[in-house]
Amino acid sequence: MPFFKSLPPDAGVRHILQMNKPVGRELVRLHETLLRGDSPLTPAQRELIAAYVSGLNECQYCFGVHAETASQFGVPEEQLRKMLFNLGDVQLEYRMRALLDYVRRLTLAPHQLVQADADAVFAAGWSERALHDAILTTCLFNFMNRLLDGHGCTGNTQIYEERGQALARDGYAPLLKALE
């Protein structure tokens, strides 16, 4: 149950963003640009990062929605769940493992990042732009996790499936209609 009486029992992102529509519109535009716009990272890779960060933060709502979105792009949810405990136990390409190692540290211990962490990502073949986009995605989902958790929104399986499928199919821009 959400912490705010003005939010419905099934509250999610679209409800929270309506509480301050100008800010909500900018957040949706950021999501659309960052997660579906031009990037060396595919939408599937960016959704994987979104789900991974959300899982690390134990944000039930965001993990549920973005795990479903990532699965729509071909990332098995079982793989995502295993990654949260040990990346070494999951079959991942070397490049993605290096990027997710960085994302994990940025999420859980950002003050411990050092040049060697970035260098490991570059050595795996990622460009500065790719790491930058991964960092932006990590930052966005650390923010979103706190936004949803701060409002007490947890969602449910039906919401995760509906939102995840819609995000994979249509991206984030349709959320702007709810903010007119």
Image (tube, grey):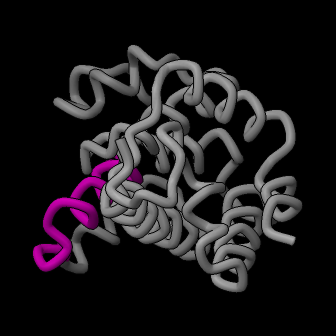
Q: Tell me the residue at 62%/23% (across/down).
A: 161
Q: Name the quadrant of the C terminus.
A: bottom right
Q: Residue 38: x, y in percent?
A: 80, 65
Residue 121 makes an appearance in the image = no
Query: Is 136 on the left-hand or right-hand side of 172?
Result: left
Q: Position of residue 76 (x, y in %)?
A: 51, 17
Answer with left or right where residue 114 lies relative to residue 52: left
Q: Is residue 146 above or below residue 129?
A: above
Foreground pick, 96 / 69: 69
- Above or below for 18 versus 76: below
Residue 179 at x, y = what percent? 79, 68
* Quarter assignment of residue 163: top right
| Residue pictured at 59% horizontal, 32% vertical | 70
Residue placed farthest to the front in the image? 5
Q: Is residue 101 magenta?
A: yes
What quarter of the picture does the N terminus occupy?
top left
Q: Residue at x 47, y 48 (%)?
A: 49
Q: Which residues are magenta?
A: 98-113
Magenta region, main secondary structure: helix
Percent position of residue 129, x then y: 61, 74
Above or below for 116 versus 174: below
Residue 125 in sight from this viewpoint? yes
Above or below residue 148? Residue 114 is below
Magenta includes 38?
no
Nearer to me, 160 or 179? 179
Q: Nearer the viewer, residue 39 or 115?
A: 39
Q: Residue at x 83, y 64 (%)?
A: 176
Q: Quadrant of residue 110?
A: bottom left
Q: Tag count in the figure?
A: 0
Left or right for 39, reference 91 = right
Query: Camera-side residue: 118 or 164?
Result: 164
